[in-house]
């Protein structure tokens, strides 16, 4: 079904990203794993090959650090030079509720990686996606977007920082980006959709504090209630590969079904303003 198609998955070395890459390789797609930790990415690539029985040509590892705009530009330059086509871009990588840290360019880490890094990445690969049309952009968000808002006065957490709010804001930004990019790509043959994977057992929550006493209970509950990475990746694979969503754009899916979003996630005025400010922040316009 995906034979001859090339798919980029960011953050593909673990969790949902790795399961997404494996799911696409199973469908005979070729996956470029865009990762910051090359050692773990190479291990994950070997694991995917073992799981799927695919040969090395279907799994490629490339260095990408979304906390560095220089790295994003270098990655995109390499892709444009080496790849004749790009059928799907899956913006999957994410930082979750980390203590206040800054990217190489001085952005708050969650907003910088989850939104701005992917914003620049997508922008720089758009021409290749358009040339490869029909092509797709898939954005991994989170239901926690509901707790976020876009405060244009303090997008970079200079005035205050709350790690949970900052994560929610970055995931709301993902949905507003999806909405605005889908509008801009109308008629181009590039479709853009988002998804919320639900609560998945991954190492994304490594910054969440659970007491030593509660840890065994937390682990037990997570095995019972949380999705496996494979279950969490199902909607990503669906949006990347399924003929059911051909031509569908600007929607958000969960469990392979379209969702109704809160108004703040589809506010055209806010989406457009966030786009303009993001362009300035990543240096696309002054």
Image (spheres, helix red, strand yellow):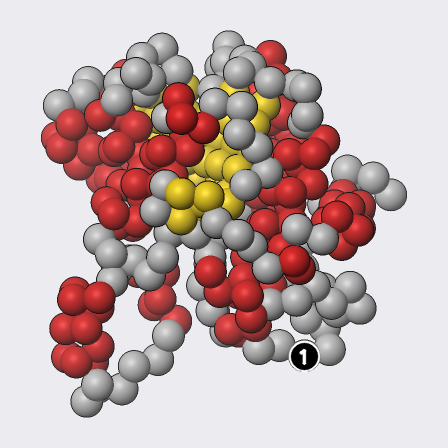
Please identify the quadrant where the C terminus is shown.
Answer: top right
**Camera-nearest residue between 64 and 257:** 257
Task: Please name the residue shown 34% across and 34% down the image.
Answer: 237
**Against 263, is 271 above or below?**
above
Query: Element type at marker 1?
Result: loop
Disc 1: CA contacts within 10 A as few (<14), some (14-19) or many (>=20): few
Q: How many marks?
A: 1
Q: Is residue 244 left or right of residue 40?
A: right
Q: Is residue 36 visible?
A: no
Q: Is residue 133 visible?
A: yes
Task: Please name the residue shown 49% across and 36% down the image.
Answer: 138
**Camera-nearest residue between 134 and 68:** 134
Choose top left, top right, bottom left or bottom right for residue 201: bottom left
Task: Please name the residue shown 19% across and 73% down the image.
Answer: 221
Q: Is residue 2 left or right of residue 79?
A: left
Residue furthest right in the image: 286
Please identify the quadrant where the N terminus is shown.
Answer: top left
Q: Position of residue 36 (x, y in %)?
A: 42, 45
Q: Is residue 29 left or right of residue 92?
A: left
Choose top left, top right, bottom left or bottom right for residue 181: top right
Task: Please name the residue shown 60% across and 12% down the image.
Answer: 131
Q: Position of residue 25 (x, y in %)?
A: 26, 25
Q: Position of residue 110 (x, y in %)?
A: 55, 61
Residue furthest bottom in the image: 213
Residue located beneath label 1 in the image? 160
**Against 272, is 240 above or below?**
above
Q: Position of residue 270 (x, y in %)?
A: 76, 54
């Amino acid at each position: 079904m995906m034979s001859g198609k090339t798919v980029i998955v960011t953050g593909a070395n673990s969790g949902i990203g790795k399961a997404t890459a494996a799911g696409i390789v199973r469908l005979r797609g070729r996956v470029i794993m865009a990762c910051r930790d090359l050692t773990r990415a190479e291990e994950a690539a070997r694991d995917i090959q073992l799981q799927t029985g695919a040969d090395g040509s279907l799994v490629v590892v490339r260095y990408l650090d979304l906390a560095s705009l220089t790295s994003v530009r270098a990655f995109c330059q390499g892709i444009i030079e080496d790849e004749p086509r790009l059928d799907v871009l899956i913006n999957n990588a994410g930082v979750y509720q980390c203590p206040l840290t800054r990217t190489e360019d001085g952005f708050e880490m969650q907003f910088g990686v989850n939104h701005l890094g992917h914003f620049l990445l997508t922008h720089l690969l758009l021409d290749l996606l358009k040339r490869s049309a029909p092509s797709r952009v898939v954005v991994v968000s989170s239901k926690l977007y509901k707790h976020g808002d876009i405060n244009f006065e303090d997008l970079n957490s200079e005035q205050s920082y709350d790690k949970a709010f900052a994560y929610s804001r970055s995931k709301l930004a993902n949905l507003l980006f999806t909405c605005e990019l889908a509008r801009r790509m109308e008629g181009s043959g590039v479709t853009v959709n988002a998804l919320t994977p639900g609560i998945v057992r991954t190492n994304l929550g490594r910054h969440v504090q659970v007491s030593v006493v509660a840890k065994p209970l937390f682990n037990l509950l997570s095995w019972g209630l949380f999705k496996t990475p494979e279950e969490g990746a199902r909607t990503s694979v669906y949006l990347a590969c399924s003929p059911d969503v051909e031509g569908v754009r600007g929607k958000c899916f969960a469990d392979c079904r379209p969702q109704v979003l809160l108004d703040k996630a589809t506010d055209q005025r806010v989406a457009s303003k966030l786009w303009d400010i993001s362009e300035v922040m990543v240096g696309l316009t002054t």
